[in-house]
């Protein structure tokens, strides 16, 4: 069911797009056809049995390079050393591959910690950070607070790159420079100094400021490794004896959530499920599938402790807690429109991944998203609503039902779909751009239902750009089929970011 490649993975192509200027709507059907072709079961765009012009090649050895270190946990796992090469022996499972190291030792490693040597491109350079917004680049560099500290990141124009450089001259600030290409395909920051590749260009500016505010001197310290899909190969049942429970992080629908340390080294959040609140056996089966959902904007499910009661749901730990609380407690001057839009884009990317895998969230709202370091936002609790036993939560007439996030077809027929998630996403955008206001204020649920049925929608948040409010309104179209998909929303929001905010 799940694909190996996420479309959010960093691009390594360097060529400027040759696509003529098409409108997004005329471009999308073609894009859809391409996506359908590359995601066909069997993993290829060519149907089985299609005659191939090429003679059968001997299967080549796949070699990968470790992007992050990994410490073997269970017997059967293999440790990874950053930068070292490994031969892939079995990549038939999506998230854990069997590889061989240079000493001939064989074991499983998380596939998101490595990159194929042939396609590694810029990823082998410590200064390349791939998908990182301007806002996050600024907060990472500010945190380092070193003169000449820099990163190269994907620009919001596909296939292009931006250099973000921190300087303390005059006052601390981050400058952003587009890496341009001339007609000969050479790269430059200032057209007096062209180089045949980006690494050469970076090297040049390490020695010469050449028009930049200062020389490139340092890169941020090692960035944290991403979570793995499960804590080890084929592991989703977690021994509670290996979890040390720490402080309480909060309490929600299902009970208390505490921070946990697994085997003394992996931070986790542990949701202790109040007994009788969920249909446990069904959920435990589903948890095996959920550990396999992996995206940088989804809170990773590590596994469950299902052998005792209460059962524990063990997930990735997110330092700043729920997005709703984060919006309410953070000073408004720290949350400018660019940061707020970046948060919405991140949620949209996580949701586009769920949509691609035909996975419906059913309770998307700011309270169900979490914030980590560098303003990273991830969607949590996807699909959990299906296992709740409380009628007050599951029936649209219930007091705990998320009415204010529900579209007409959910209110009328409890008809959930990715398009009902899109409606909820519009409300989430409204929560973000009001910095955590409650939608529809103090209106009673019955009044909200009436208002939605009449086709009335939430008002434009104060100071919100028309372009952004238009996206919210598209999410609130009465007929689900008229609402955009998350895939389209992602493109539209990126377009808004590019046209009205700096890249
Ligand atoms: P929930 O039961 O998911 O509504 O969680 C209740 C509260 O616990 C949230 O509002 C957060 O403050 C906190 N919390 C839940 N999951 C996490 C996590 N993965 N990392 C950090 N805090 C969390």
Image (cartoon, rainbow, N blue to C red):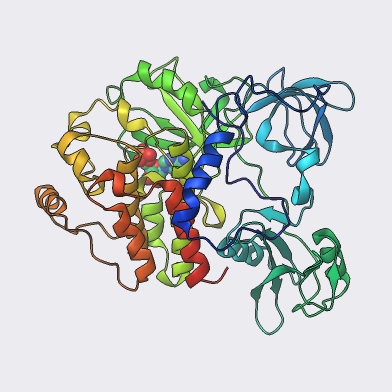
Quadrant of ligand 1 in image:
top left
> Left or right: where does residue 179 sit relative to residue 489?
right
Res 343 seen here: no
Indicate whether 299 appears above or below 169: above
Residue 128 at x, y percent in the picture:
73, 55
Residue 115's place in the image compared with 172, above or below, is above
- Where 183 falls versus 127 (above or below)? below
Q: Which residue sits at x=27%, y=22%?
A: 276
Left or right of 76 on screen, residue 309: left
Residue 446 seen = yes
**In the image, is 288 to the left or to the right of 13?**
left
When asked about the image quadrant of residue 433, the answer is: bottom left
Quarter containing the C terminus: bottom right
Q: Where is residue 494 in the image (x, y as percent from the top left)?
A: 50, 59
Residue 502 percent location from the top left of the image: 55, 71
Give the number of marks. Answer: 0
Looking at this view, is 488 or 375 the one in front? 488
Q: Which residue lies furthest to the bottom in this view?
A: 170
Residue depicted at 80% across the width and 21% down the height: 56
Q: At x 31% / y 28%, what residue is drawn?
A: 386
Going by the image, does 148 lie left or right of 38? Answer: right
Residue under the point 39% across and 59% down: 327
Residue 7 image position (x, y, % from top left): 57, 44
Establish if 451 lies above or below 335. above
Closer to the camera in the image, 154 or 321:
154
């Amino acid at each position: 069911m799940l694909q190996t490649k996420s479309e959010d993975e960093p691009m390594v192509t360097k060529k400027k797009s040759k696509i003529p200027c098409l409108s997004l709507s005329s471009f999308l059907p073609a894009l859809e056809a391409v996506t359908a072709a590359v995601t066909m079961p069997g993993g290829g765009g060519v149907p089985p049995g299609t005659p191939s012009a090429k003679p059968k090649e001997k299967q080549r050895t796949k070699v990968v390079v470790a992007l992050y270190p990994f410490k073997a946990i269970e017997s059967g796992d293999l440790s990874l050393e950053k930068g070292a090469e490994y031969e892939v022996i079995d990549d038939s499972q999506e998230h854990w591959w069997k590889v061989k190291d240079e000493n001939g030792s064989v074991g499983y490693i998380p596939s998101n910690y490595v990159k194929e040597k042939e396609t590694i491109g810029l990823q082998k350079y410590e200064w390349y950070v791939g998908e990182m917004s301007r806002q996050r680049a600024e907060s990472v560099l500010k945190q380092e607070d070193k003169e000449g500290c820099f990163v190269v990141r994907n620009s919001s124009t596909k296939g292009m790159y931006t250099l973000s450089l921190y300087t303390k001259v005059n006052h601390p600030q981050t400058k952003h420079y587009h890496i341009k290409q001339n007609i000969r395909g050479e790269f430059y920051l200032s057209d007096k100094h062209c180089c045949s590749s980006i690494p050469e260009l970076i090297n040049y500016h390490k020695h010469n400021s050449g028009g930049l505010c200062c020389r490139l001197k340092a890169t941020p310290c090692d960035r944290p490794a991403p979570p793995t899909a499960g804590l080890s190969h084929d592991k989703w049942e977690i021994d509670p004896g290996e979890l040390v429970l720490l402080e309480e992080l909060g309490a929600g629908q299902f009970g208390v959530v505490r921070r946990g340390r697994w085997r003394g080294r992996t931070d986790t959040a542990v949701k202790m499920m109040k007994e009788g609140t969920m249909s446990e056996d069904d959920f435990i089966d589903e948890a095996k599938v959920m550990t396999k959902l992996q995206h940088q904007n989804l809170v990773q499910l590590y596994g469950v402790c299902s052998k005792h009661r209460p059962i524990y749901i063990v997930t990735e730990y997110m330092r700043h807690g729920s997005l709703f609380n984060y919006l309410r407690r953070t000073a408004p001057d720290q949350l400018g429109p660019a940061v707020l839009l970046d948060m919405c884009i991140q949620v949209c990317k996580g949701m586009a991944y769920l949509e691609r895998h035909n996975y419906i969230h059913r309770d998307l709202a700011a309270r169900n998203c979490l914030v980590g370091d560098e303003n990273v936002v991830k969607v949590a609790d996807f699909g959990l609503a299906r296992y709740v036993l409380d009628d007050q939560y599951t029936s649209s007439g219930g007091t705990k039902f998320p009415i204010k996030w529900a579209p007409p077809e959910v209110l009328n027929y409890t008809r959930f779909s990715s398009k009902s998630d899109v409606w909820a996403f519009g409300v989430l955008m409204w929560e973000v751009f009001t910095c955590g206001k409650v939608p529809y204020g103090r209106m009673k649920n019955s009044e909200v239902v009436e208002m939605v049925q009449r086709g009335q929608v939430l008002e434009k948040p104060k100071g919100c750009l028309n372009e952004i409010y238009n996206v919210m309104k598209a999410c609130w179209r009465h007929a689900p089929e008229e609402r955009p998909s998350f895939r389209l929303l992602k493109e539209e929001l990126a377009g808004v970011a590019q046209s009205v905010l700096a890249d």
